[in-house]
Image (tube, coloured by chain):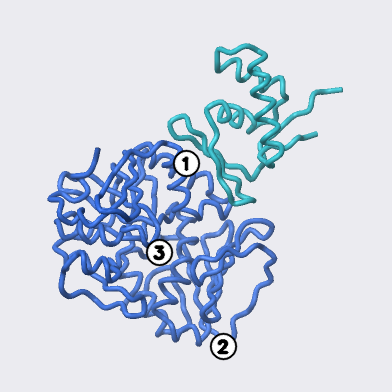
């Protein structure tokens, strides 16, 4: 496999795995970003007095007084250092960590890349994105148990184009905000899988989920979506209900699910302005999603006020 | 003795959506909303401002009495000083 420009690695096996993962995601490193990965017997510890923020098994330290971003993995020794004013990440990964390669990539390395991509004007948000039959961009935002993936899979099965069920990046495009999707299988828990009622899928055993590529559900994958409708999702009750969100609620939700805006002074204003611009360009709603969504002929569209 | 001047803290980032101000406090990793008046004052506080200048800013933006503008400014400023959103500078 051809290596990806901007990535160096001293371990051919890991380099091939990272290259395959990023190639599949359709999010290669933009020109100018540099990711230097080194497999080591012993990861060098970096002294860092800053407060630790935990995101799953990933620990993040950022901001003053050191400036650079320090990311460590709590599963096995691995750490990344992302420079404050240079688009560079230096990563050390222990041989022990390579034993959990799949999880290493989608937790530790993904978070490291999220901070590296910020240096190219791409800002992560936990969101699913899709385009309906009328060509309107939709964005589903919420936590990992809020119905994003199940709804994204449903929309894919109804012929909507889909981009991602969770890993999205905001990017300025002229005076609009567009969202790039990190291509990966739509990952459904048992409940969502049963609601969808589709056979097949890829068993994602370590995550207790079943994955579907959009194409397996009758959809086509699209990388970029320009949201016109944003839905802040939650699940519960018997009937799906969608109601408008106030400007204050919109900003609160966008900040909550694009939390990295808080972590570095560098580009924080640009990131914050992008969130506000996104809130202005889209109609925004709260949605409580229920199983009746699956019986609605046009899915989410049928519930818009 | 000259009037003290106030300045938005360097850890503050500010934006707005339909008149609703959103303030990020990077050092404390928290965010909060401010109303339109608060937004006007915080925008002005990007540069050092005295209390009198801030009151004048509100009088330029809104049709209110000087007394109302002064009360609003004092209350907002006190809150911002207590929460490290604004600092007094020499």
Left or right: residue A93 versus residue B7 is left
Q: Which type of secondary structure does the marked residue at label 1 adopt? A: helix
Chain B colour as displayed = cyan
Tell me where residue B58 appears, x and y as whole percent: 60, 19
Estimate the spatial distance between the alpha carbons at disc 1 and disc 3, rounded to whole Å: 24 Å
Estimate the spatial distance between the alpha carbons at disc 1 and disc 2, rounded to whole Å: 43 Å
The residue under label 3 is: A29
Identify whether B31 is placed above or below A161.
Answer: above
Chain letter of the residue carrying label 3: A
Q: Are the residues under badges 1 and 2 in a single subunit?
A: yes
The residue under label 1 is: A273
User: At 55% from the left edge and 34% from the top edge, which residue is drawn?
Assistant: B34
How many marks on residues?
3
Chain letter of the residue carrying label 2: A
User: At 12% from the left edge and 50% from the top edge, which residue is drawn?
Assistant: A297
Q: Quadrant of the C terminus of chain A?
A: top left
**Of label 1 and label 2, which has the lower sequence position?**
2
Chain letter of the residue carrying label 1: A
The residue under label 2 is: A41
């Amino acid at each position: 496999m051809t290596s990806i420009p901007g990535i160096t690695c001293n371990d051919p096996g890991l380099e091939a795995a990272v290259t395959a993962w990023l190639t599949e995601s359709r999010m290669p490193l933009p020109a100018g970003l540099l990711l230097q990965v080194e497999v080591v017997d012993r990861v060098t510890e970096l002294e860092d007095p800053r407060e630790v923020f935990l995101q799953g098994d990933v620990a993040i330290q950022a901001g003053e007084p050191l400036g650079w971003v320090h990311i460590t993995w709590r599963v096995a020794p691995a750490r990344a250092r992302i420079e404050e004013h240079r688009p560079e990440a230096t990563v050390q990964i222990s041989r022990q960590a390579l034993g959990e390669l799949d999880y290493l990539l989608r937790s530790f390395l993904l978070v490291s890349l999220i901070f590296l991509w910020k240096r190219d004007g791409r800002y992560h948000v936990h969101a699913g994105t899709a385009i309906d039959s009328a060509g309107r961009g939709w964005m589903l935002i919420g936590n990992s148990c809020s119905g994003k993936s199940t709804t994204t899979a449903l929309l894919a099965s109804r012929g909507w184009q889909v981009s991602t069920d969770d890993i999205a990046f905001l990017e300025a495009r002229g005076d609009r905000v567009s969202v790039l999707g990190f291509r990966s299988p739509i990952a459904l828990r048992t409940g969502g899988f049963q609601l969808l009622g589709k056979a097949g899928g890829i068993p994602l055993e370590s995550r207790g989920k079943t994955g579907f590529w959009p194409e397996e559900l009758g959809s086509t994958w699209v990388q970029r979506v320009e949201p016109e409708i944003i839905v802040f999702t939650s699940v519960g009750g018997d009937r799906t209900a969608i109601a408008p969100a106030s400007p204050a609620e919109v900003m609160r939700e966008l900040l909550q699910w694009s939390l990295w805006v808080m972590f570095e002074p560098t580009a924080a204003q640009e990131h914050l302005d992008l969130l506000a611009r996104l809130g202005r360009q889209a109609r925004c709603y709260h949605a409580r999603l229920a199983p009746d969504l699956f019986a609605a002929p046009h899915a989410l569209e049928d519930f818009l006020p | 003795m000259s009037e003290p001047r106030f300045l938005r803290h360097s850890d503050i980032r500010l934006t707005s959506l339909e008149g609703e101000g959103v303030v990020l406090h990077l050092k404390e990793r928290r965010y909060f909303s401010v109303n339109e008046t608060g937004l006007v004052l915080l925008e002005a506080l990007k540069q050092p401002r005295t209390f009198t200048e801030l009151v004048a800013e509100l009088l330029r933006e809104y049709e209110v009495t000087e007394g109302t503008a002064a009360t609003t400014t004092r209350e907002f400023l006190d809150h911002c000083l207590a929460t490290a959103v604004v600092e007094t500078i020499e």
